[in-house]
Image (spheres, grey):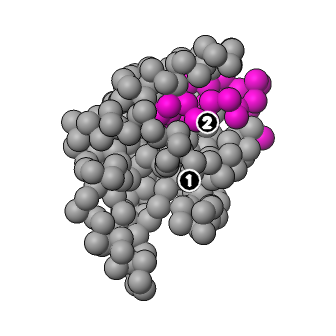
Amino acid sequence: MELAAVKTSYKYWAPVYDYTFGWISRGGRRRTVDYINSRSGRVLEIGVGTGLSLDLYRPHLEVTGIDVSPEMLDKARQKVAEKGLTNVARIGEMDARALAFPDDHFDTVVAMYVISVVPEPEKVMEEMARVCKPSGEVLIVGHYARKSGFLALVERFFAPLANVIGWHSDFEESRVLGVPALEVTRRRPLPPLGIFTFLVQRKRAQA
């Protein structure tokens, strides 16, 4: 999806996102943040959206969230203020293809339910790896295209509607696995019905 299409799509989704896809993704989002809560240090959440995950992070983590949708970010900032989330260091508008953070800055970088939406996901993965510390982790929660079966046919049917529904139903997992600095250490299905996958990649320690 082009950046303009992403912004337009989420401008319309923002008012109802928490009660639609936010509800569908709740279980997987909670499991992902539970994993992050076992870690320490700085966390960067790519595609923070309306801030559905923000109150799940434990206070010992310093959390930064970015998104390209001003409408979504307004709702995220409102949640931070209403819930007094003092561990949220920053919520800002930013293109994930050009992150305004230094190299090796975050202990954990996570993108939940967004990698199939962003333009140039390979570039986004490179940026996520760049800002992650050596031995840190890059986490992706996403849906990947099936190779065969009825659901594969359904995915291909909805693929041309990406700009309307806000995600690519035929997104290939290989598009998030091409960064040499990252190695896969964990992969598991997430609810509902294993539609989504939780993928952990560790950044190789620098020599």
Amino acid type, mark 1: Ile
**Residue denoted by label 2:** 53
**Can you tell which quarter of the image residue 9 is in?**
top left
Tag shown at residue 148: none
* Magenta-drawn segment: 38-64
Left or right side of 116 for 40: right
Amino acid type, mark 2: Ser
Of circles 2 and 1, the one toward us is: 1
Q: Residue at x 59, y 68 (%)?
A: 194
Q: Nearer the viewer, residue 8 or 34?
A: 8
Q: Residues within 10 Å of mark 2 (few under 14, many from 20)?
A: some
**Residue 19 appears at what percent x and percent y?**
53, 43
Relative to 50, residue 79 above or below: above
Q: Is residue 42 magenta?
A: yes
**Can you tell which quarter of the image residue 158 is in?**
bottom left
**Residue 115 appears at what percent x and percent y?**
41, 49
Relative to 51, residue 188 above or below: below
**Residue denoted by label 1:** 24
For numbered disc 1, what is the local secondary structure? Answer: helix
Q: Residue at x 45, y 38 (%)?
A: 16
Q: Nearer the viewer, residue 201 or 74?
A: 74
Circle nearer the N terminus (2, 1): 1
Estimate the spatial distance between the alpha carbons at disc 2 and disc 1, rounded to whole Å: 13 Å
For numbered disc 2, what is the local secondary structure? Answer: loop
